[in-house]
Image (cartoon, rainbow, N blue to C red):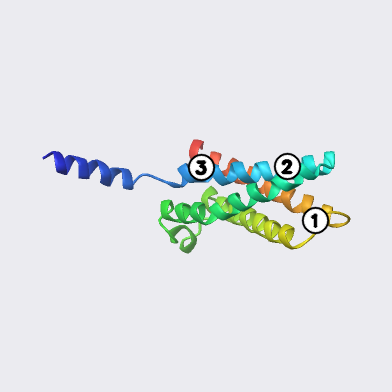
C-alpha cells in the first residue's frame, strides 16, 4: 500500500509544470549580462567586460533546457499546430524564442569580434534588444499566469 502511495505521489509530481522552475536561471544570467555590458561601456572597465562572457555563456547554454521544458509543459507542439493568435502562449513563445536567438547571436558575435570602436554599438544593441525582449516575455508570462 505504501509503495502505491509513493508511486502515486511521484506520478503526480511528474505531471506538474517544470518550465517555471528552470526559466529563472537563464533570465538572471542574461539580465546580468546586459547590466555588465552597460556598466562596461559606462565605466570603460576591462574587468567588468571580462565578466560578461561567463554569465552569457551560462545563460545561453541553459536556454535549450528552458525551451524543452516550455514545450513539454505546453504539450509539445499542440499550441503551434492549433495557433490561437489571441492567446498569450503563442506570443510568449515567439518573443522568448526571439530573445533566445538574439542572445545566442550576441554570445557568438562577442566571442569572435572586438567590442571597441563601432563594435560597441552592436554589442550594446544586441544585449539591450535581448534584455527588453526578456522583459516583454515576462510580461506575457505574467498575463498567462495571473490573467
Q: Which residue is mark 3?
A: 144
Answer with mark 2 or mark 1, whichever residue precedes in sequence. Answer: 2
In the picture provided, is 91 more to the left or to the right than 123? left
Tag 2–tag 1 contact (CB < 8 Å) = no
Q: Which residue is mark 1?
A: 122
Q: Which residue is mark 2?
A: 36
Q: Is residue 108 or residue 101 the one in the foreground?
A: 108
Q: Residue at x 84, y 39 (%)?
A: 43
Answer with mark 3 or mark 2, whichever residue precedes in sequence. Answer: 2
**Residue reaching furthest to the left:** 1
Q: Residue at x 54, y 40 (%)?
A: 143
Q: Secondary structure at mark 2?
A: helix
**Residue reaching furthest to the front:** 47
Q: CA distance from mark 2 to mark 1?
A: 15 Å
Q: Secondary structure at mark 1?
A: helix
Query: Is 143 situated above or below 104?
Result: above
Q: CA distance from mark 3 to mark 2?
A: 30 Å
Please identify the quadrant where the N terminus is shown. top left
User: Where is residue 39 drawn, in percent x and y?
Assistant: 78, 39
Q: Residue at x 49, y 61 (%)?
A: 80
Amino acid at each position: 500500500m505504501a509503495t502505491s502511495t509513493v508511486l502515486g505521489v511521484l506520478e503526480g509530481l511528474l505531471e506538474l509544470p517544470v518550465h517555471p522552475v528552470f526559466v529563472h536561471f537563464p533570465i538572471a544570467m542574461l539580465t546580468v549580462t546586459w547590466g555588465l555590458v552597460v556598466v562596461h561601456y559606462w565605466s570603460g572597465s576591462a574587468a567588468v567586460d571580462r565578466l560578461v562572457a561567463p554569465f552569457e555563456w551560462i545563460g545561453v547554454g541553459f536556454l535549450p533546457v528552458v525551451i524543452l521544458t516550455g514545450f513539454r509543459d505546453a504539450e509539445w507542439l499542440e499550441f503551434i499546430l492549433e495557433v490561437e493568435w489571441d492567446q498569450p502562449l503563442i506570443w510568449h513563445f515567439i518573443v522568448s524564442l526571439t530573445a533566445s536567438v538574439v542572445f545566442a547571436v550576441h554570445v557568438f558575435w562577442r566571442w569572435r569580434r572586438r567590442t571597441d570602436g563601432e563594435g560597441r554599438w552592436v554589442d550594446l544593441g544586441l544585449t539591450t534588444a535581448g534584455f527588453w525582449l526578456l522583459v516583454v516575455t515576462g510580461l506575457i508570462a505574467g498575463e498567462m499566469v495571473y490573467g
